[in-house]
Image (cartoon, rainbow, N blue to C red):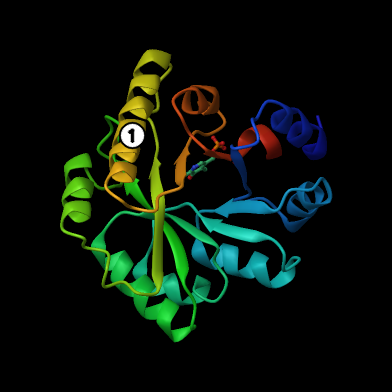
Amino acid sequence: MSISNQLHSLRKQLAPHVSLVAVSKTKPLADIEAAYQAGQRLFGENKIQEMAQKWEQLPKDIEWHMIGHIQTNKIKYMAPFVSLVHGVDRIKVLTELQKQAEKNNRVISCLLQVHIATEETKFGFSASEIKAFIREKSFENFRNLQIKGLMGMASFTKDKRQISSEFKGLKKLYDWCCSQGTNFEVLSMGMSGDYPEAIAQGSNMIRVGSLIFGSRN
Ligand SMILES: *Cc1c(COP(=O)(O)O)cnc(C)c1O
């Protein structure tokens, strides 16, 4: 199936409150242009410099989401244009994002990544760290950042019950944060292999790559 057909059939399954980030990492400009022609405007990349190159060459009404692990020395390359940073997993990232956002005279929106999987290799804060930050109002000093919600990745497993239970835990944490007077509005969870489970557990933003663009090398 073509990129535009894949996008249309995926969108048909989504309720209006669920945003679709098309994950175009490693894919050529022509693929992104095909998705753009099919009406897609949110794109996700996991390498800052690759995203910056694509931003330079593609229409300026694309909203670029940084979904990968962040190297703080590269933040300066995306600070002028990035629309949402999903993978904030340590305070050092917030400190550098704040510095670069201020330099660019912008407010940068971001999500806190929460470690919900069993694998050690996935990044993110623990639920108790997130709760402590919120109780201590740790984010008030980051004047050029808007923390908009949470992001998580489930374990890489075929066990759908485990995946659902990890997503359910993240939704519970998200609801707790909302109840504490944060202005959270984004819960980013779900990828090609597990987006139905994520949406069933309350995701309102899914990040889908291979299902739209085909598998990556
Ligand atoms: C690559 C990636 C995705 C998309 O993965 P697919 O399985 O291709 O849909 C989503 N989220 C993150 C953080 C990724 O790195």
Give the labeled residue for mark 1.
170
- In the rendered view, does 177 fall on the left or right side of 7? left
* Number of disc labels: 1
Q: Residue at 46% of width from left, 30% of height from top?
A: 202
Q: Is residue 195 above or below residue 111?
A: above
Q: Name the side, left or right, on which 135 lies relative to 74.
A: left
| Residue 130 to residue 57: above or below | above
- Would residue 159 be visible to someone looking at this image? no
Q: At label 1, which amino acid type do we have?
A: Leu
| Residue for point 41% across, 63% down | 146
User: Looking at this view, is 177 or 101 the one in front?
Assistant: 177
For image coordinates 26% across by 73% down, the residue present is: 141
- How packed is label 1: few (under 14 Cα within 10 Å), some, or many (20 or more)? many
Q: Which quadrant would residue 19 be assigned to in this image?
A: top right
Residue 83 as seen in the image, left or right of residue 8: left
Q: Position of residue 9 (x, y in %)?
A: 76, 28
- Of the pair 52 and 95, the residue shown nearer to us: 95
Q: Is residue 127 above or below residue 34?
A: above
Q: In the figure, residue 56 lies in which quadrant?
A: bottom right
